[in-house]
Amino acid sequence: MTSTSKRGFASMTPERRAEISRMGALAAHAKGTAHRWTSDEARVVGRKGGKVSGERKRAAFKRYDSGGDILPDGRHVDPLMRKRGKS
């Protein structure tokens, strides 16, 4: 039997969670282990994320075009409608 009571961070107010996050960030900066993104680093990482996202979408459509019966959004497709170019 599982409990449905909130535990840990789920039981805290958003303000308390933000306070704890702030303390962790300050500690990391004081210790010297925190990472600050430069605009160039952020740009490179953002480009990589967008590339992966696009590749996943193209792969999903490729599977659909090769005869799959499920669209990337989970809808089922009638094979007869697919032959007519409708979904």
Image (cartoon, rainbow, N blue to C red):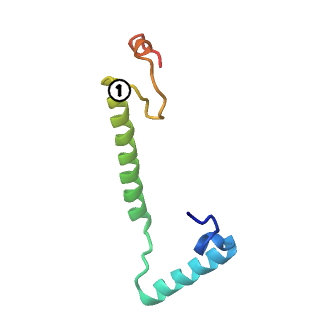
**Quick one: which residue is furthest to the left in this view?**
66
Which of 36 and 75 lies nearest the eye of the viewer? 75
Residue 42 position (above or below residue 34): above
Q: Of helix, strand and loop, which one carries label 1?
A: loop
Q: Quadrant of residue 57?
A: top left
Residue on which the image places disc 1: 68
**Quick one: which residue is furthest to the bottom in this view?**
30
**Quick one: which residue is furthest to the front in this view?**
1
Image location of residue 3, percent across then percent down: 60, 66
Residue at 39%, 25% in the rendered image = 69
Image location of residue 37, percent across then percent down: 43, 69
Q: Quadrant of residue 34?
A: bottom left
Residue at 41%, 12% in the rendered image = 80
Which of 83 and 34 lies nearest the eye of the viewer? 83
Image location of residue 63, percent across then percent down: 32, 30
Q: Quadrant of residue 77?
A: top left
Position of 66 compared to 19: left or right? left
Which of 16 and 38 lies nearest the eye of the viewer? 16
